[in-house]
Image: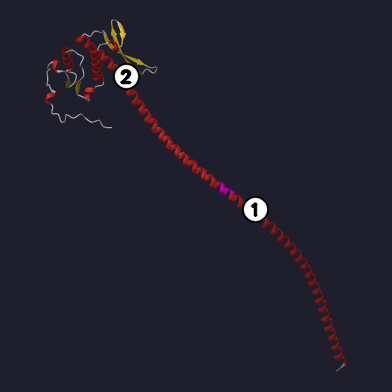
Amino acid sequence: ETLAEEVERHAARQREAERKQREAESLREEVKRLRLDVEESAAELEQLEENRDALEGELTELESALDEQEAAVDEELTDVTVRINECERRLSEKRQELADLEDEREGLAALRERREELDAELTALRNRKRDAQTELVAQFDEAMAAVMERFAPGFGGAHLRLQTGPDGDVERIDLVIAREGRETTVDALSEGEVELVGVALVLAGYRAFDVDERVPAVVVDGIGQLAAEHLHNLAEYLQDTGEYLVTTAYPEVGSFDGRTISPEEWDVVSDDAATPTD
């Protein structure tokens, strides 16, 4: 090997060494830069970890607050649900009360209507009663005038007096007897006169209350104190009162126009006296 070659070889080696030195320097710079990057990354990582811990703490607090809020909301929801159920129950009760009141209102309306009907009926009945009482007085006056004319009793006459109360309704009807210009009672009359007044009173009621529409027969019985001519006169007076006139009389009174039935013609079932029952 020549010197020139050796020099060239050493020069090449020097150049290679310098190149490697530069590469090594570059690598050291790169390592230094990477270390700086690692340190910066480590610092960032530490900061991120701190941030993460802080965020985890905040998240824990938020979760705890959320749990508390959810519990509060659940409790409030439960209270609201209870209040809603209570309100619905009270509303249902009020609706039922309203329905009951509506039924009562309809019932009251029906009762008011029925009361009005009953009031109208009562008024009509009172009017009918008052009219009948007035008619009774008029019929008695007419019958009594006929009695006085036909039988000429020993008293001055009789009339009915209506005694009314504060409301105008008739509380009682008094029988007023006149004798010798003064008022007296039936106790002052003879039995025959009492029977004549009774006939006039019964006849007035028979006519005033339209008894003939339901009972077409007039029965005269037990008039034993009237003289025979008065009994005949009475039968003649009453013959146009009803469709049928039935009277009883003793044989000595004589016969009447019409059909006569004698007890002697009756068929007796038994002569035994009737046994009273409890």
Judge depth for marks 2 and 1 and give the one in front: 2
- The structure residue drawn at horizontal position 73% and vertical position 60%, both measured from the top left corner, is 54
- The structure residue drawn at horizontal position 29% and vertical position 10%, both measured from the top left corner, is 188
Q: Residue furthest bottom?
A: 1
**Residue where numbered disc 2 is placed:** 130
Query: Does the segment drawn in magenta span residue 257?
Result: no
Up-down: is 150 above or below 272? above
Q: 7 or 209, which lies in front? A: 209
Q: Position of residue 109 (x, y in %)?
A: 40, 32
Q: Which residues are magenta?
A: 79-83
Tag 2's secondary structure? helix
Coloration of the structure image: secondary structure
Which amino acid type is shown beneath numbered disc 2? Arg
Image-based side of 159 in relation to 219, left or right: right
**Residue where numbered disc 1 is placed:** 69
Q: Position of residue 247 (x, y in %)?
A: 17, 20
Mark 2: few, some, or many residues within 10 Å (few <14, many ≥20)? some
Residue 131: quarter of image: top left
Tag 1's secondary structure? helix
Which amino acid type is shown beneath numbered disc 1? Gln
- The structure residue drawn at horizontal position 21% and vertical position 22%, both measured from the top left corner, is 212
